[in-house]
Image: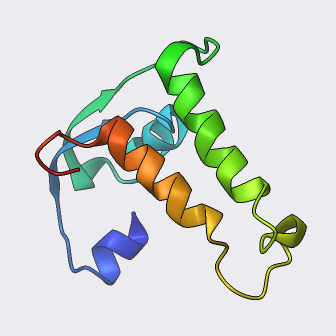
Amino acid sequence: MQMAMKELRLHNFRFVEGRAFVDQLRASSETFPEFMDALMPLACNTIPIAGRNRIVRKLAIDAILNDPGYSGGEYKTQPEGLNTAIGVLAIMIGRPLLV
């Protein structure tokens, strides 16, 4: 919040929504109550990832990990498998006209 106020020169948020970091959002609202007009924390259920979402994530991860250039994370150049992973994710989250 301080970075937003200082670096971005923001003085007030009209609406703040938070999903993943609900506790941090709550803490920020208590620390800087004057900074936010409205707050909407959303809790998410922790359930296993399944179906197409799981398959796409697995394909993207495997494309990177199985690339010889990856070398267990100690790569010297960007692994080619990353391009495959980006393509797989683009198919999953993109709209048909943009893919």
Is residue 53 visible to the viewer in this orientation of the structure?
A: yes
- At horizontal 53% and vertical 13% (from top left) the residue drawn is 51
71 or 1, nearer to the observer: 71
Apparent side of residue 86 relative to residue 34 in the rendered image (left or right):
right
Res. 94 image quadrant: top left
Q: Quadrant of residue 73?
A: bottom right
Q: Residue at 32% of width from left, 84% of height from top?
A: 7
Q: Nearer the viewer, residue 43 or 53?
A: 53
Would you say 14 lies left or right of 71 here?
left
Q: Position of residue 65 (x, y in %)?
A: 77, 55
* Residue at the image point whose x is 86% and y is 77% from the top: 74
* On screen, residue 37 above or below 78: above
Count numbered badges in the picture. 0
**Spot occupied by residue 33 in the image (x, y as percentages of width and height):** 31, 47
Q: Nearer the viewer, residue 35 or 84?
A: 84
Query: On screen, 48 above or below 41?
Result: above
Image spot of residue 12 (x, y percent): 17, 60
Visual colour scheme: rainbow
For the N terminus, give its image quadrant.
Answer: bottom left
Residue located at (64% from left, 14% from top): 48
